[in-house]
Image: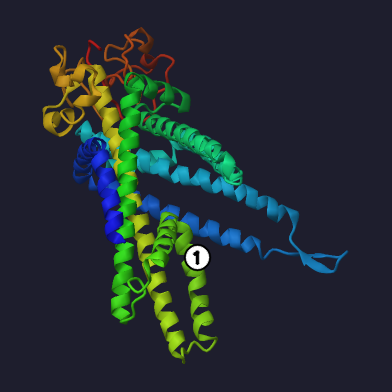
Amino acid sequence: MLLVGAAIELVFMALCWRSINRAAEVISVASAGLKATPTVIGVSVLVEGLYVGYTVLWIVFVIATFNVKEVNEASCRLDEPGWVAASRWIYGPMFFIFTYVFLNIKTVVCAVGIGAWYFPDSDAPMVPAFKGLQWACTSSSGAIMFASLFVGIVRYVINRITDLMNWLPICLSPLTCLWSCIAGCLLSILEMFSKFMLIGQAFCGEAFCGSARRSFNVVKDRLGDAFITDSIGENVVTMSTYIFSLGLGIASWAWLDSAQDYQTLTAMPWYILIPVLLLYAYFISIPALTITLLAWLAPWFHVWTCGSDGVCSSDWQVDAQHSINSVTGALFIGAVCYCLFNFIGEIVLSTIDTIFFCFAIEYDNDIYQTRFKTQVYEVLREDCPDNMIPMDGGLSQPYSPKGDAATATTVTGSPQLVVSSNGGDINHLPAPSAPSMYNRPPPNAPANTTGSTPIPADQAMIGRPTTPR
């Protein structure tokens, strides 16, 4: 059975080898960035820990609502108050919304950490990822919440409509399939735009609408490439983490059988093994729910098998307990592995999007870095018009963290809009296709040189050459 599954996977990989190879090349770029900035992973672990704590509290609160009763004097019994049932309708959307909140916080952390690595500057903070976490909880919190609110509500509505569509008669299943395709495409586009908007917000420091406009200006000429890079990378990473976790779970199942000297996996006939593995694969795909159910039901499994005294006195009780140990242990290991690998995958995907965004800024501003010629530019050559990377352009200039005010391009630890070095108004400068990220004002610049555009206190600045593309 396992060989059949492996054969199916090999056929799929053979049919999609170009896309998988392309995604692997882009992921290698992201891995190089993460290797150079390990603090991004460390800060993301902190954010993930907060999300796990929020999830635990959410589950506890939802379970606790079922214990809230009040006396119904008319019927002389305990009934559930109406406001408790209504609160559960609020808890559902809020969970989706705050799931995106924590995901977007990790996106901002990756954007700042990887951005500081991509555009190095001696004035950058020692740990840019921590600065990104600070912005995510302060100046960028509004943009994060707005994006999370919009995408979270859309996802919740799509899921509810999908649940209703699943109840349609089988003769209408093509409509369900069509809806799933349209809804999945719509949700993917919204998630992609929200991620690039937050990355742009981390680079320019504007409000939600301004950041969205500037981010769109960066990727508008390569929306297809951005969507393909994001979707293929996400599909490959998600599928890889799921298959790897599923394989580890099944391997742990076989190991537990061997440790207990009781075979459950290999002893099942194929017509039972197939549905059992399909059910196992389904539970692995919902790791949070699986871990919660195992933690809740594990004590009861032993009581149901061996009685309230906990002593398995008969052979069938011992065999049943061995089977439960193997199945629940394999489910737990597979679900935990999927959570862990999925977390790493989210960081890799955010890193891919950030590097793509930085590359788009370089391309639009005719700047390049020699150190990235093989590592980044050649890999992303297919995403450039006419397969021309920045170094191929006649007007391209080397990136200079510290240099002449006319060509300096800096990242100092936070995204900011600044004015030109000659004190002119931003509105008088030619508008590049990249975000309006200009040079740092001189230290003695008077306060009125900022015109009508407010400048935050410590945002990252990315300049542009004098002659924009």
Dot 1 amino acid type: Leu
Residue beneath the point at 38% across and 71% down: 268
Q: Quadrant of residue 72?
A: bottom right
Q: Secondary structure at mark 1?
A: helix
**Picture coordinates of residue 174, whole percent (x, y):** 52, 37
Residue positioned 43% across, 89% down in the render: 315
**Residue 285, above or below 142:** below
Residue at label 1? 293
Is 407 left or right of 50, judged from the image as shown?
left
Res 304 visible = yes
Total residue callouts: 1
Q: Quadrant of the C terminus?
A: top left
Residue furthest bottom in the image: 313
Where 456 sits versus 262, above or below? above
Q: Nearer the viewer, residue 417 or 239?
A: 239
Q: Nearer the viewer, residue 452 or 161?
A: 161
Asked which quadrant contains residue 350, the reply is top left
- Which quadrant of the structure image shows residue 219? top left
Residue found at x 22% / y 10%:
467
Q: Residue at x 32, y 9 (%)?
A: 429
Residue 143: % across, % down: 46, 33
| Quadrant where the image shows the N terminus | bottom left
Q: Is residue 209 left or right of residue 330?
A: right
Q: Percent from the top left, x then y, of residue 128?
A: 28, 40
